Image: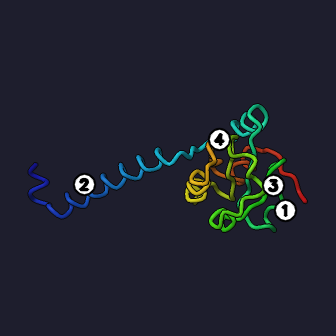
Amino acid sequence: MEFFFNHPFLSLAWIACFVAIIFTFIQDKLSGVNVIGNNMVGVLVNSQKGIIVDLRSLNDFKSGHITGSVHLLPSDIKTQNTGKIDNYKDKPVILVNQDGLNLLESGKALTKMGFTSVYILKDGIAGWLTDNLVLVRK
């Protein structure tokens, strides 16, 4: 308590950061989008008939992508132009980009469109390559 009274601005800043972290954590958990590792991709695709959606640029996709993945851009999801994957609303949809970051917005958008099982591949293609997993080149 002595610290709080001696440093009120620092204490309030700490409390604000703590509340923001908790709020973000709860919001992420309630979004319906889960983060998975490379080992779960095969399980979701093979046993549950899921699909991998690569959200990188078309050039990056052509230079190497996960086998069986479909190419879409984040802008396609924003504009609800998801015709390539509409048949997968009740199956796992795994979102992939270069590093696994900044995919939550696309995942939430798919959830709002009625996709029931949306996943983000942790570490993206970079993590896939780090684990020495194969990419297909077009």
Give residue 118's position: percent from left, percent from top: 62, 46
CA gap, disc 3 and disc 2: 43 Å
CA gap, disc 1 and disc 3: 7 Å
Q: Residue sitting at 79 percent across and 54 percent down?
A: 70
* Residue matched to label 2: 15
Res. 37 image quadrant: top right
* Residue matched to label 4: 37
Q: Which badge, 3 or 2, comes first in the chain's sequence?
A: 2
Q: Secondary structure at mark 3?
A: loop
Residue 67 or 125: which is nearer the viewer? 67
Local packing at callout 2 (Cα closer than 10 Å; few below 14, some 14-19, many 20+) is few
* Residue matched to label 3: 65
Q: Which mark is residue 30?
A: none
Residue 82 or 1: which is nearer the viewer? 82
Q: Residue sitting at 18 percent across and 64 percent down?
A: 9
Give residue 60's position: percent from left, percent from top: 78, 64
